[in-house]
Amino acid sequence: MNNSYSKYINIWLFSLATIILIMIAVGGLTRLTGSGLSMVDWDPIMGIAPPLSQADWDFLFSQYKLFPEYQIKNFGMTLNEFKFIFWWEYGHRVLGRLIGVLFIVPFIFFFLKKCFSKKDLYSYTFLLFLGGTQGLIGWWMVKSGLDLNPYVSHFRLAVHLLIAQIILSFIAFLFLKRFTLQGYEKISNSHSLLFLIFSCLIFITVTYGAFMAGLDAGQSYNTWPKMGETFFPDGLLFAEEKFMGIFDNSIFIHFFHRSLAYLCIAIILIISILHFKKIKYVVQKIHFISIISLVIIQVVIGIYVVLSNVQISLGSIHQIVGSLLFALTFSYFLLLNRRKI
């Protein structure tokens, strides 16, 4: 295996992680600004060309007017207002194509230079598969809002976000693995088990965070620590004497997302009290401290997001920190189980 390009592979992986994080941030802002349905078709090749003339804009706007989002939500929208939402979605899609190029071209170069082991090759091929799948999932998500109901499916939104964060996590794992030849020490079976529980909680919390965004559930209550006048708001499970599902009731989703955040803090603090002093490797300690810090920061930001009635800038920061937390959590978990991967 050729190691002479090792430094450039590190730069490549770090650059990919950075631009994917930017992509997630732009995707979140696209959602927060209500821009996700402004492009009503998907052309992977020619779709990179922006509108360059007034005729182009008139055509795109006329196409947008044919769909329910304009007819039901944005009726009477001006062309300038349309341009604002269009550029967010356009930027998000162009970033997706740019990430594809930034992955494939260096990957082919390093492959031809025989820089990858057999295991590495499997890992990067898996990333390529996830990246291609993510583009299809993105369009599948958008299509859900171009039907009779002008709202993107919160289930499809969650899948789209989770795949993006899994890609970011796996790149972080591959990057950190190159600097930790000895691997991460499991310390004890309880450490591995508790961190597995914590990782599952982070996964579920992020899933419900996507549900929150998809259903605008963050705007249902703008108080903390109570939700309105009580800790257990009306309509949590039942409304109008009917049971409301745990996957589509915005009040339950908001309550559960908050509760999961508190539980995440509790579990990571228990792990730190029981095991932090036993961690030998400096890189592993720094990684673990980063996770603890991000959990606390994320909960604090989440509180301010609620109190601000989901201010766009705070909502975006909340998603960025959440993505970093997800990536560091799952890369830590993968490094604990490195021998199996």
Image: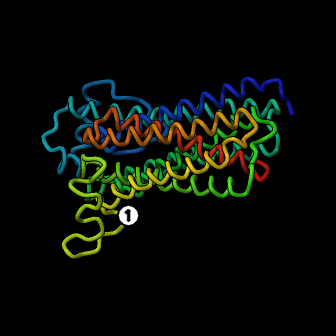
Q: In which quarter of the image is residue 43?
A: top left
Question: Can residue 47 be seen by looking at this rendering?
Answer: no
Secondary structure of the residue carrying numbered label 1: loop
> In the figure, 50 relative to 308: above or below?
above
Question: Can residue 147 be seen by looking at this rendering?
Answer: yes
Image check: 40 left or right of 326?
Answer: left
| Residue 173, horizontal then vertical, whole percent | 67, 40
Residue 114 vs residue 239, the one in the foreground? 239
Q: Quadrant of residue 12?
A: top right
Residue 250 vs residue 35, the one in the foreground? 250
**Three-letter code, disc 1:** Phe
Mark 1 closeness class: few <14, some 14–19, many ≥20 residues within 10 Å: few
Residue 132 vs residue 57, the one in the foreground? 132
| Residue 318, horizontal then vertical, whole percent | 40, 38
Q: Residue at the location (75% across, 36% down)?
A: 281
Q: Residue at the location (51% across, 38% down)?
A: 294
In the displayed orientation, state which residue is furthest to the bottom: 241
Residue beneath label 1, please? 247
- Figure disc tally: 1
In the displayed orientation, state which residue is furthest to the left: 76
| Residue 61, horizontal then vertical, whole percent | 24, 37
Q: In which quarter of the image is the N terminus?
A: top right
Image check: 317 left or right of 121?
Answer: left
Q: Residue at the location (34% across, 69% down)?
A: 245
Q: Residue at the location (73% across, 43% down)?
A: 278
